[in-house]
Image: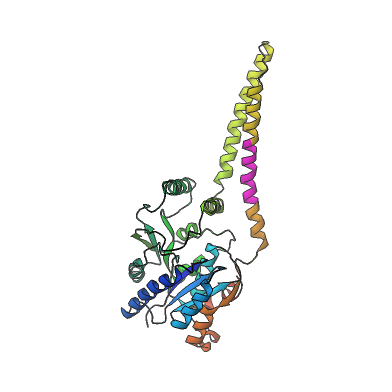
Amino acid sequence: MGNRLTIVSPCYNEEDVLAEAAKLLGEILDKLIAQGKIAADSKILFVNDGSVDATWQMIKELEHKSPKYTGIKFSRNFGHQNALMAGLKKALPWSDMVITIDVDLQDDVEKIYEMVDCYHAGNDIVYAVRNNRDTDSKFKRNTALFFYWMMKKMGVELVPNHADYRLMSQRAVKALLEYREENLFIRGIIPKLGFKNTKVYYARKERYAGVSHYPLKKMLNFAINGITSFTIVPIKIMLYLGIVISTLSGLCLLWVLYSFLTSHTVSGWASVMMSLWFLGGFQLITISIVGTYIGKIFVETKHRPRYIIEEDDYTQGMTNQLGQSQVAHGTLRDAGKLPKELNHVNVN
């Protein structure tokens, strides 16, 4: 029968590129099936992340054209990382391996063949890594390099130049879903799973159509979330800076006292103002960093759902295809071994 593959692709207002992406991914799926490397009932799962254009209607049309296409629809926009997690969770009980890839066609879809071969060679995780950043602006390239350097210095294990294009085995996906935090930084969690892994390299392309959904503001928020989700080093840095500033302030106090005793005191408006502005700015930065961590704690304690699914054509289709009896008797690919919370259909 072969190993069943599900390709998970998040979509947010992707009507300009969806048809071409579905075509290319469908052709790859057909070739892999013909080669006997994956099961004939493998799927391409589009996760509609609250699109306001015709994305969901196009997904429904694809479902009618071929059973290899399927989709789930969020009730609103919940974000790219949550869309990935929803697709992985839905695919887990039915799939031996899952590939996640963005629908914008910037990632080289041809690498899927090599990724599947790496899976058959015994790898649970296959990272697709960019071999260059030529398509990025100079600013984006330099900030990305600085981000990876900074994360490494802070002790966060990342795969440089790897985003969310990867293959994961069923047990790797199951392990990932054990991470329950609300503030998701998936590319920082994956290396912590510890399974056998490898890398494939590709050249990233220009976006096929449409506009990027990751402007500078989102990239900055993503970087801040990644840092604060995995390390408290920023708070430690503020502590060390506070100690240094306090030491310097103590030395300045001794100098002021000496000047006073020797009658060399001179009113210095500029130095006083500079000190006030510096210390005031430092305090605001420190409070903001601590506040960010406290805010994350606040969000985590609410235990709100990561996403809400309005329609789930994938689970319904697989259930109808393989038969209700498999689900009822627990014979569905390790479904009986999953935690109860992983078996919910509409809310996570």
Look at the image and give the residue range highlighted in magenta.
281-294
Is residue 116 among what the camera can see?
Answer: yes
Q: Considering depth in this image, is 145 or 172 the residue closer to the camera?
A: 145
Closer-to-camera residue (322/220): 220
In the image, residue 242 lies at what x, y percent?
61, 35
Decide whether the magenta segment is chiefly helix, strand or loop.
helix
In the figure, residue 244 lies in which quadrant?
Answer: top right
In the rendered image, the quadrant that contains the N terminus is bottom left
Residue ID at (50%, 65%): 176
Q: Nearer the viewer, residue 302 or 82?
A: 82
Q: Quadrant of residue 52?
A: bottom right
Along the horizontal axis of the image, is 4 left or right of 319? left
300 versus 154 height, above or below = below
Q: Position of residue 22 (x, y in %)?
A: 42, 73
- Magenta stretch containing residue 257, yes or no? no
Q: Image quadrant for the C terminus?
A: bottom right
* Residue 326 image point, x, y percent: 51, 86
Q: Is residue 289 magenta?
A: yes
Q: Is residue 283 above or below residue 68?
A: above
Q: Is residue 333 visible in the rendered structure shown here? A: no
**Is residue 39 found left or right of 244 in the rendered image?**
left
Q: Residue at x 54, y 54 (%)?
A: 218
